[in-house]
Amino acid sequence: MTTDQLLQLDCRVAENRRTIQKALRKMKPFSKVDMGEDVPLVKIEKVLRLMLNKYQVDITWIFVSHDDENMRYTISLRDDGGEGARLLQTVYGITLYEVMCKAAICIWSLVKKGILKERSEVHCV
């Protein structure tokens, strides 16, 4: 399954949630989390912070919208490589947990593809 396909999954469906969890476990920091449990949000936040500090990427904004039944979360990721910063990806989810999982997967994929470069200096978010 491609990263774009993972980002389109609706995590209200149990099988899709399991697929997202499997994708997270391909990332070294999450590889030892027991398959019987979800990767804890606090771990996802920590890894996101480490990736944002190490690579030329930033979360530009997190937007929340809602209707009578659901909240909807949107995270915008942008290239922070200096001149000409550009939008890399917009990630959507029904829960904050879902959108944070998808953001981590997206950034990890961009790093693996060589699209994101390491920062030349320490970056604090």
Image (spheres, rainbow, N blue to C red):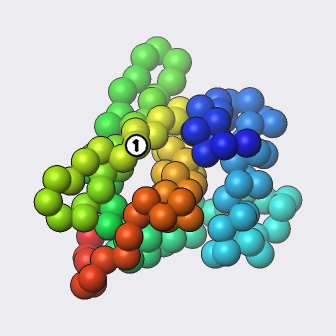
Q: Position of residue 57 (x, y in %)?
A: 33, 61
Name the residue: 46% across, 15% down. 68
Place residue 22 in its image quadrant: bottom right
Place residue 63 in its image quadrant: top left
Place residue 49 in its image quadrant: bottom left
Name the residue: 64% across, 36% down. 5
Residue corresponding to mark 1: 89
Q: Circle 1: is it few (<14), some (14-19), or many (20+) Cα within 10 Å?
A: some
Name of the residue lying farthest toward the right: 36
Name the residue: 36% across, 47% down. 88
As drawn, 5 above or below 76: above
- Determine whether, in the image, residue 36 is placed left or right of residue 23: right
Which structural element holds mark 1? strand
Residue type, mark 1 in image = Gln
Between 8 and 112, the one lying in front of the other is 112
Q: Position of residue 42 (x, y in %)?
A: 53, 67
